[in-house]
Image (cartoon, rainbow, N blue to C red):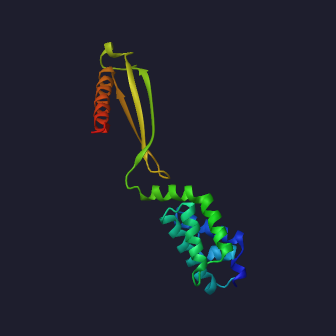
Amino acid sequence: MAGELEGGKSLSGLLSGLAQDAFHGHRGITEELLRSQLYPEVPPEEFCPFLAKMRGILKSIASADMDFNQLEAFLTAQTKKQGGITSDQAAVISKFWKSHKIKIRESLMNQSRWDNGLQGLSWRVDGKSQSRHSSQIYTPVAIVELEFGKSGQESEFLCLEFDEVKVNQILKKLSEVEETISTLMQPA
Protein backbone atom coordinates (compact mmCIF):
# COMPACT_ATOMS: atom_id res chain seq x y z
CA MET A 1 0.00 0.00 0.00
CA ALA A 2 2.73 2.51 0.91
CA GLY A 3 4.45 1.96 -2.43
CA GLU A 4 1.17 2.54 -4.27
CA LEU A 5 0.85 5.99 -2.66
CA GLU A 6 4.44 7.01 -3.47
CA GLY A 7 3.98 7.76 -7.20
CA GLY A 8 4.97 11.34 -7.94
CA LYS A 9 2.61 11.84 -10.88
CA SER A 10 -0.36 10.46 -8.96
CA LEU A 11 0.42 12.61 -5.92
CA SER A 12 0.88 15.69 -8.08
CA GLY A 13 -2.47 14.97 -9.72
CA LEU A 14 -4.07 14.48 -6.31
CA LEU A 15 -2.70 17.82 -5.08
CA SER A 16 -3.98 19.52 -8.24
CA GLY A 17 -7.42 18.01 -7.73
CA LEU A 18 -7.48 19.06 -4.08
CA ALA A 19 -6.42 22.59 -5.03
CA GLN A 20 -9.08 22.80 -7.74
CA ASP A 21 -11.73 21.75 -5.24
CA ALA A 22 -10.58 23.75 -2.20
CA PHE A 23 -9.21 26.93 -3.75
CA HIS A 24 -10.56 27.35 -7.27
CA GLY A 25 -14.21 26.40 -6.72
CA HIS A 26 -14.41 23.33 -8.98
CA ARG A 27 -16.77 21.33 -6.79
CA GLY A 28 -17.10 18.37 -9.17
CA ILE A 29 -13.82 16.85 -7.98
CA THR A 30 -14.89 14.19 -5.53
CA GLU A 31 -12.97 11.79 -3.34
CA GLU A 32 -14.15 8.87 -5.47
CA LEU A 33 -13.09 10.60 -8.70
CA LEU A 34 -9.59 11.23 -7.33
CA ARG A 35 -9.25 7.65 -6.08
CA SER A 36 -10.56 6.02 -9.27
CA GLN A 37 -8.44 8.18 -11.59
CA LEU A 38 -5.20 8.39 -9.61
CA TYR A 39 -5.13 5.47 -7.17
CA PRO A 40 -7.52 2.81 -8.56
CA GLU A 41 -5.59 -0.04 -6.91
CA VAL A 42 -5.84 1.48 -3.42
CA PRO A 43 -8.95 0.47 -1.44
CA PRO A 44 -11.15 3.33 -0.17
CA GLU A 45 -10.42 2.56 3.50
CA GLU A 46 -6.70 3.18 2.87
CA PHE A 47 -7.17 6.08 0.45
CA CYS A 48 -9.43 8.17 2.72
CA PRO A 49 -6.85 8.74 5.49
CA PHE A 50 -4.17 9.48 2.89
CA LEU A 51 -6.46 11.99 1.17
CA ALA A 52 -7.31 13.65 4.50
CA LYS A 53 -3.60 13.94 5.34
CA MET A 54 -2.75 15.52 1.96
CA ARG A 55 -5.75 17.87 2.17
CA GLY A 56 -4.66 18.97 5.65
CA ILE A 57 -1.07 19.54 4.57
CA LEU A 58 -2.12 21.54 1.50
CA LYS A 59 -4.55 23.68 3.52
CA SER A 60 -1.89 24.31 6.18
CA ILE A 61 0.61 25.42 3.56
CA ALA A 62 -1.91 27.64 1.77
CA SER A 63 -3.45 29.22 4.87
CA ALA A 64 0.00 30.14 6.20
CA ASP A 65 1.01 31.38 2.72
CA MET A 66 4.34 29.69 3.32
CA ASP A 67 7.45 30.95 1.65
CA PHE A 68 9.94 28.33 0.48
CA ASN A 69 12.01 28.31 3.69
CA GLN A 70 8.89 27.84 5.82
CA LEU A 71 7.70 25.15 3.42
CA GLU A 72 10.93 23.18 3.69
CA ALA A 73 10.88 23.39 7.50
CA PHE A 74 7.22 22.33 7.58
CA LEU A 75 7.74 19.39 5.21
CA THR A 76 10.85 18.26 7.10
CA ALA A 77 8.80 18.22 10.31
CA GLN A 78 6.08 16.24 8.51
CA THR A 79 8.59 13.60 7.38
CA LYS A 80 9.87 13.12 10.93
CA LYS A 81 6.40 12.90 12.45
CA GLN A 82 4.88 9.50 13.29
CA GLY A 83 2.43 8.70 10.48
CA GLY A 84 3.72 11.67 8.49
CA ILE A 85 4.86 11.77 4.89
CA THR A 86 7.85 10.31 3.09
CA SER A 87 10.68 12.42 1.72
CA ASP A 88 9.53 11.60 -1.83
CA GLN A 89 6.05 12.89 -1.02
CA ALA A 90 7.61 16.00 0.55
CA ALA A 91 9.55 16.62 -2.67
CA VAL A 92 6.36 16.35 -4.76
CA ILE A 93 4.46 18.67 -2.40
CA SER A 94 7.32 21.19 -2.50
CA LYS A 95 7.44 21.14 -6.29
CA PHE A 96 3.64 21.49 -6.46
CA TRP A 97 3.61 24.46 -4.07
CA LYS A 98 6.43 26.22 -5.93
CA SER A 99 4.49 26.06 -9.18
CA HIS A 100 0.98 26.77 -7.79
CA LYS A 101 1.57 29.18 -4.90
CA ILE A 102 0.72 32.37 -6.79
CA LYS A 103 -2.54 31.06 -8.27
CA ILE A 104 -3.69 29.60 -4.96
CA ARG A 105 -2.85 32.83 -3.13
CA GLU A 106 -4.76 34.92 -5.71
CA SER A 107 -7.74 32.61 -5.45
CA LEU A 108 -7.77 32.84 -1.65
CA MET A 109 -7.51 36.63 -1.84
CA ASN A 110 -10.44 36.80 -4.26
CA GLN A 111 -12.52 34.51 -2.04
CA SER A 112 -11.84 36.69 0.99
CA ARG A 113 -13.07 39.93 -0.61
CA TRP A 114 -16.56 40.91 0.40
CA ASP A 115 -17.12 43.83 -1.90
CA ASN A 116 -16.68 44.46 -5.56
CA GLY A 117 -13.44 45.99 -6.71
CA LEU A 118 -12.52 48.21 -9.61
CA GLN A 119 -11.77 45.86 -12.50
CA GLY A 120 -11.19 48.42 -15.20
CA LEU A 121 -11.28 52.09 -16.10
CA SER A 122 -11.41 53.72 -19.50
CA TRP A 123 -11.95 57.29 -20.57
CA ARG A 124 -12.19 59.38 -23.68
CA VAL A 125 -13.09 62.89 -24.79
CA ASP A 126 -15.97 63.23 -27.24
CA GLY A 127 -17.88 66.04 -28.84
CA LYS A 128 -21.47 66.31 -27.63
CA SER A 129 -23.77 65.56 -30.56
CA GLN A 130 -27.17 66.08 -28.90
CA SER A 131 -28.41 68.60 -26.39
CA ARG A 132 -31.51 70.52 -25.39
CA HIS A 133 -29.65 73.72 -26.19
CA SER A 134 -28.00 74.15 -29.58
CA SER A 135 -25.13 76.11 -28.01
CA GLN A 136 -23.98 72.95 -26.19
CA ILE A 137 -23.70 70.80 -29.32
CA TYR A 138 -20.11 69.86 -30.22
CA THR A 139 -18.74 70.98 -26.87
CA PRO A 140 -16.14 68.57 -25.49
CA VAL A 141 -17.24 66.08 -22.84
CA ALA A 142 -15.17 63.56 -20.91
CA ILE A 143 -16.67 60.08 -20.71
CA VAL A 144 -15.39 57.78 -17.99
CA GLU A 145 -16.39 54.11 -17.85
CA LEU A 146 -15.77 52.16 -14.63
CA GLU A 147 -16.02 48.38 -14.42
CA PHE A 148 -16.82 46.95 -10.98
CA GLY A 149 -16.98 43.32 -9.91
CA LYS A 150 -15.28 40.31 -8.45
CA SER A 151 -13.06 38.19 -10.64
CA GLY A 152 -14.93 35.19 -11.94
CA GLN A 153 -18.27 37.00 -11.74
CA GLU A 154 -20.08 39.24 -14.17
CA SER A 155 -19.04 42.88 -13.91
CA GLU A 156 -21.19 45.99 -13.61
CA PHE A 157 -20.40 49.13 -15.57
CA LEU A 158 -20.84 52.77 -14.61
CA CYS A 159 -20.61 55.42 -17.31
CA LEU A 160 -20.04 59.04 -16.28
CA GLU A 161 -20.15 62.10 -18.52
CA PHE A 162 -18.43 65.35 -17.50
CA ASP A 163 -18.46 68.73 -19.15
CA GLU A 164 -15.50 71.09 -18.89
CA VAL A 165 -16.73 72.67 -15.62
CA LYS A 166 -17.12 69.27 -13.91
CA VAL A 167 -13.69 68.11 -15.13
CA ASN A 168 -12.12 71.26 -13.64
CA GLN A 169 -13.95 70.66 -10.34
CA ILE A 170 -12.69 67.07 -10.20
CA LEU A 171 -9.13 68.17 -11.00
CA LYS A 172 -9.32 70.78 -8.21
CA LYS A 173 -10.53 68.14 -5.71
CA LEU A 174 -7.78 65.73 -6.80
CA SER A 175 -5.20 68.47 -6.27
CA GLU A 176 -6.57 69.05 -2.76
CA VAL A 177 -6.36 65.32 -2.01
CA GLU A 178 -2.79 65.21 -3.34
CA GLU A 179 -1.80 68.18 -1.16
CA THR A 180 -3.37 66.57 1.91
CA ILE A 181 -1.54 63.30 1.28
CA SER A 182 1.73 65.16 0.76
CA THR A 183 1.24 67.04 4.03
CA LEU A 184 0.47 63.84 5.93
CA MET A 185 3.44 62.03 4.44
CA GLN A 186 6.02 64.64 5.45
CA PRO A 187 8.10 63.68 8.50
CA ALA A 188 7.16 65.45 11.73
Residue found at x 52% / y 63%: 66
In the orientation shown, which residue stands out farthest toward the top?
Answer: 135
- Pick the quarter of the image with the C terminus: top left
Quarter residue 21 falls in: bottom right
Figure check: 128 above or below 25: above
Position of 126 with respect to 165 (left or right) is right
Figure check: 168 above or below 29: above
Nearest to the observer: residue 123 or residue 52: 52
Nearest to the observer: residue 88 or residue 76: 76
Residue 14 appears anywhere in the view: yes
Question: x%, y% of residue 128?
Answer: 39, 20
Residue found at x 59% / y 73%: 76
Residue found at x 64% / y 73%: 34
In the orientation shown, which residue stands out farthest toward the front?
Answer: 188
Nearest to the observer: residue 142 or residue 92: 92
Residue 41 appears anywhere in the view: no
Position of 10 with respect to 29 (left or right) is right
Question: x%, y% of residue 139?
Answer: 37, 16
